[in-house]
Every structure is written in structure tokens, then in C-alpha cells.
Image (tube, rainbow, N blue to C red):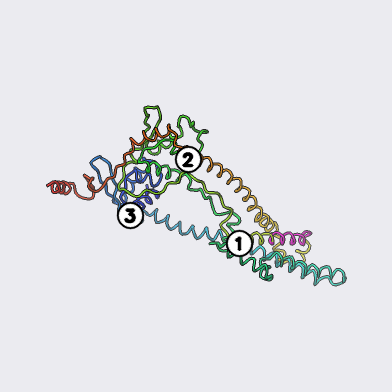
Amino acid sequence: MTPNPSIMKAVETLGYRVTVGDVATQAGLNIAEANQGLLVLASDVGGHLQVAESGDIVYLFPKDFRTILKNKYFQLQLQETWQKVWNIVFYLIRISFGIILIASIVLISIAIVIIITSLNNSDNDSRGDSDFKGGNFFVIPDIWWYLSPDYYSGNPSRRHQNNNQSNQQKSELNFLEAVFSFLFGDGNPNADLEERRWQEIAAVINKNRGAIIAEQIAPYLDDIGETYQQEYEDYMLPVLVKFNGKPQVSPDGELVYYFPELQVKAAQKRQQKVAPFLQELPWKFSKASSGQLILSGGLGCVNLIGALILGAFLLDGTIASEIGGLVGFVQGIYWLLLAYGIGFLAIPLVRYFWIQHRNRKISQRNRMRMARTAILENQAPKLQKKLSYAKQFANQQYITEQDVTYSTETDLLEQEVKKLTDTQ
């Protein structure tokens, strides 16, 4: 059983001396998972236990425990190597879509030029026909010229306008990465939502010294009044289970909640600022700059129009059979080129409307959670009584080195001698 990465990160953040409550608060893990994970990690890296007079336990870890783990577990070394390999592979996958787009445009362009040149050279009997085909030769490049991204470089006013846009918005992505971002976006901005939810709930409990009321937690939960009944505060049950909370009934019949394990800390640290409610981040269409998006969309249009023009030439199949070579190859993969051209524009379009729908739902949930903060801000008399009663159970305990009665760092006999010396 390899150590939990979330626990390792929490131990490093907290300074390598932690309690179960510290780790549960920092990582947003349930008490049982944090306790088991700390035992596993301490066993694997040679950590030490410090026991206070109260019976509470502090875990002390070496600062190089990650190096110890890598030397001990081949699986961790393999995971680290695979992560590096996957980063390279995924990067190649990302840029491949841009490379395929450019290759498709070049292939279609060359095929069209070959076909038009062949038609012009093979049919000179009629002046009218010749003029018509010559017209095709000159008109099509003009269309490509206006659709091409190089059109800006030939038009000073447009080039100046494009430069101004690029100066206003810069992107960290290169063009090939921007093409992938245009197609598929940049991932779910709320992939860690559940982790953030429990971290912020634990932070609220910690800020209130381990004792809270349900109204303080409601802005971080969903489905209140749907899955759970708000009147009876049933929505607090998952919080109590996760952090081993205990309900307490006030003389007025109101419920407050306290969490003994989260009240025990290895050291007193400055409290981090807690968000007033859990805020989901809206989905972004792309991290690419506006210029990169326009260029990607423009090239997609060029690719699709080129495929349609090429399809008109290849419709009866006689031209490809007469010319052969590259044109014959292009005819063989034409439907693949056309499907890529349509998909290149259809996928971002569908994704755009999907994002708008998704963001409306996110905004609605954010507004609902934010509205619950108004209950706390109003501070009604009934609510003030609940808060006052909860403070009776707010009792954080900090275990310092002086509070430690036994530690696995040194021999038990040495500790007893040290105690006698200290008392004398």
C-alpha cells in the first residue's frame, strides 16, 4: 500500500509535524482516511510518534521522506517516469491536430493546383473554354488569398489592426497548442471541486475553533432542500461522518456541532482566509488569445472550403483516374479530409453552446450558495443564540514539544532520565 499523495502534500505544507486533525483539515480527508494514511506514511519513511499527556498523538516526519519513498517503492519511481513520458506523449497529441490541419490545407491546395494546371494544359481547342479554365486558375487563388492568414501581411491596415489585437491579449500557448485549445478547450476548471469543498468546510470548522452551526456550512454544500431536508439540518450528516463530528442540543432545542479530532493541532499557525461560499469556476472556451482563435477558425474555414472545391473537381472520378499520383491518393482519402474539415468547425461550435448551458447552471449554483451567506450576515437573534452556544465547545488544543510525554525518536529509558532531570 503506497502512501496517499494528498497526505504527503499536506505533511509538507504543515511543516512535517502534524496531527490527524491537521491533515484532515489541510487535505479535506475524512478522519479515518487521514489516520490510516499517516500510519502508513510514518511506517514507510521511519516517522516518529509523539504522545502528549492528553493521549493525543503528533506525527513527526523526516523532510526527505519523498526521497526515502522513491528508493523504497519501485512503483513510485515508475509512476514518476510514466508521468514524464505521458506529458511528452500528451503534448505530441495536442500539437498533432494543428499539424494535421496544416498538412490537410497543403495537401488540398497542391491537389487543386495540379488539377487546374492539368485541365489548362490538356484543353486548348476552344478559346472560350480556355478562358473559362484560365479564369478558374486565377479566381481560386484569389479566394484562397482572402481566406489565408497571410492576407493580413498583404494589407497594411489589417496588419496594423491585427498587431493591436495581439498586443492587447497575449497567450501562453503556441499556435499548435492553440489549435487543440480551439477544438477541445483546456480541461474542467472544477475538476478539484469536491476536494476544494471539503478543504473549505474543514477551514471553516478550524476558523471557529472546532465548533460550528449548520448555517456556517450551508454555503459550501449543494442540494440543500432537495436531497436533504434543510429544516432538520440533515445536510450536516455527511460533514459529521467525514470529520467525526458530534451534535449537541442547546437548551432552546437548536443543534450545534463540534469536531474533537479537528481541535487538536501540532502547532499554532496563522489561519488562511476562507471564502464566504464555495464558488465554482465558469468554463472558458479557450485559453488561446483572440488572434489565435481567429487564425484557427480561419484556417478551419480555408480547409473546409478547399475540401469542397476539391470535391467538385473529383465528383465524377475521371480527373483523378487520368492524373493519378498525388491526386489519386487525395481522392482515396477525400472523405477523411472532408470529415476532418467539418469536424474541425463543428466541434468548437457545439462546445461553445454546451459551455454556455453549463455556465448558466454554474452561475445558478453559485448564486444559491452565495444567498445562504446572507443568513449569517443578518445575525438574527435566534442565530446569535446558536453561535453563542457553539462557542462553549470551541476549544482548540496545541501540542508543543513541552506537552510530549513520550516519543519514538529516543529510547524510553532516556526519556525517563530526561524527565527526572527536568523535574530536579
Could you say which quadrant of the image residue 301 lies in?
bottom right
Dot 1: within a 10 Å radius of its alpha carbon, few (fewer than 14), some, or many (20 or more) residues? Answer: many
Dot 3: within a 10 Å radius of its alpha carbon, few (fewer than 14), some, or many (20 or more) residues? Answer: some
Is residue 171 rendered magenta in the image? no
Q: Earlier in the sequence, mark 1 or mark 2?
A: 1
Question: Under tag 3, what secondary structure?
Answer: helix
Magenta segment range?
302-316
Q: Nearer the viewer, residue 377 or 172?
A: 377
The residue that appears at 68% across and 71% down in the rendered structure is 154
Q: Which residue is mark 2?
A: 373
The residue that appears at 64% across and 64% down in the rendered structure is 103
Is residue 305 rendered magenta in the image? yes
Q: Which residue is mark 1?
A: 292
Q: Earlier in the sequence, mark 1 or mark 3?
A: 3
* Kind of residue indicated by mark 2: Thr
User: Can you tell which mark lies on residue 261?
Assistant: none
Q: Which residue is mark 3?
A: 65
* Kind of residue indicated by mark 1: Gln
Count of numbered tags: 3
User: Could you give the CA–CA distance between mark 2 and mark 3, rounded to whole angstroms?
Assistant: 41 Å
User: Mark 1 and 2 residues: CB-CB less than 8 Å, in contact?
Assistant: no
Tag nearer the camera, 2 or 3: 2
The relative height of residue 401 versus residue 322 in the rendered view (above or below) is above
In the drawing, does residue 57 fall left or right of residue 115?
A: left
Residue 278 locus on image (x, y percent):
48, 44
In the drawing, does residue 13 fall left or right of residue 222?
A: left
Residue 96 locus on image (x, y percent):
58, 61
Residue 373 locus on image (x, y percent):
48, 40
User: Could you give the CA–CA distance between mark 1 and mark 3, rounded to whole angstroms?
Assistant: 44 Å
- Examine the residues drawn in magenta and state their main secondary structure: helix
* Kind of residue indicated by mark 3: Phe
Q: Earlier in the sequence, mark 2 or mark 3?
A: 3
